[in-house]
Image: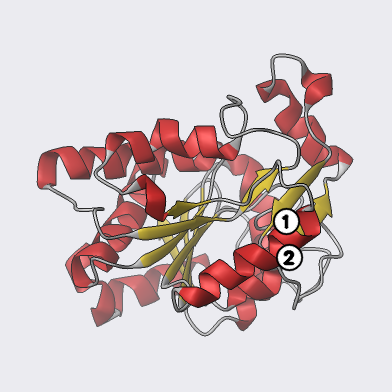
Amino acid sequence: MQVIIRDTKEAAIHLTAAVLAAQLRTKPNSVLGLATGRTMEGLYARLVAMHQDEGLDFSLAVTFNLDEYVGLPAAHKNSYRYYMNHHLFNKVNIDVRNTHLPNGMAADPEAEGARYDGLIADVGGIDLQLLSIGESGHIGFNEPLSAMFSRTRVKALTPKTVEQNAPLFDAPEEMPRFAITMGVGTILEATRCIMLVTGANKADIIARAVEGPVTSMISASALQLHRSCTVITDAAAAEKLEQQEYYRWIFDHDPQWDAFR
């Protein structure tokens, strides 16, 4: 795992966008794992700007999102399909047929999880998986006690997650209590993982995920085991990391990042 600390939220977003853009330019038919949430909105806005201003090409890309609420149709404004269409897919030249999310309306949600993993396998796996982290330490909706080798499946949402997300609904009591999410094991199979984390409210949990023990109580800690994971934070999110000076020195001296500095 490598940790990169940028001084501002905007700088962290710009670096993450540059990494994704480099992936697409190197391999135009890349399979990208995508995430949703407030952290991602600025990133997708940056990618849209790069498409419009620099010709960043999404035409051959294939995408798989981490998760979807159980019981929400794609047209519902709180579904993650709606989110992705609104923030990214409808604003770039991606083929919508190559964009995938779990079907929250599947008659058999557990079977839907197995189908989704099969689709990922059919395209040869995910080249680059984009992630963030929830305040309970989850990646995707892998809430506390998610198995490290779990597959895409239905997961009950914790009261903390419901509390954080319910205000996004017009009627908070209508927020689903279950989601279909890629499993921790599914995520760890990606060739490369990039986690974007910003804001002081994430400082405690990212320190525990990066520098604490690997534990099923914090599913993001499993990324310590990944062969190629980069965590990109702003200074506010990095505030409680004990090895900040070391992480900054590595980034400044690692030649693989010369093109991004």
User: How far separated are the C-alphas under marks 2 and 1?
Assistant: 6 Å
In the image: residue 227, left or right of residue 61:
right
Left or right: 144, with 189 as reference point: right
- Up the image or down, 246 lies above or below 8; here it is below
Location of residue 154 by image quarter: bottom right
Q: Which mark is residue 198?
A: none
Residue type at tag 1: Gly
For this rendering, which residue is in front, 99 or 196?
99
Location of mark 2 (residue)? 219
Taking depth in this image into account, of 250 and 164 the one nearest to the observer is 164
Q: How is the image coloured?
A: secondary structure
Q: Residue at left 43%, top 57%?
A: 63
Residue at the spot 84% in from the left edge and 59% down from the top edge:
144
Residue 114 at x, y percent in the picture:
70, 67
Residue 73 figure quarter: top right
Instruction: Answer above or below: position of 59 versus 253.
Output: above
Are the two marked residues, 2 and 1, in contact with CB atoms closer than 8 angstroms? yes
- List x then y, in percent, for residue 130: 48, 59
Provide residue 58's location: percent of width, then percent of height: 26, 53
Q: Which mark is residue 137?
A: 1
Circle 2: is it few (<14), some (14-19), or many (20+) Cα within 10 Å?
many
Residue type at tag 2: Ser
Please say if 127 is above or below 235.
Answer: below
Image location of residue 71, percent across then percent down: 75, 36
**Please, which residue is most extreme toward the front here?**
107
Label 1 environment density (alpha carbons within 10 Å; few <14, some 14–19, many ≥20): many
Query: Which residue is rendered at x = 77% and y = 53% of the image?
Result: 109
* First in sequence: mark 2 vs mark 1: 1
**Looking at the rendering, in which quadrant would you find the C terminus?**
bottom left
Q: Does residue 54 appear anywhere in the picture? A: yes
Assign a secondary structure to mark 1.
Answer: loop
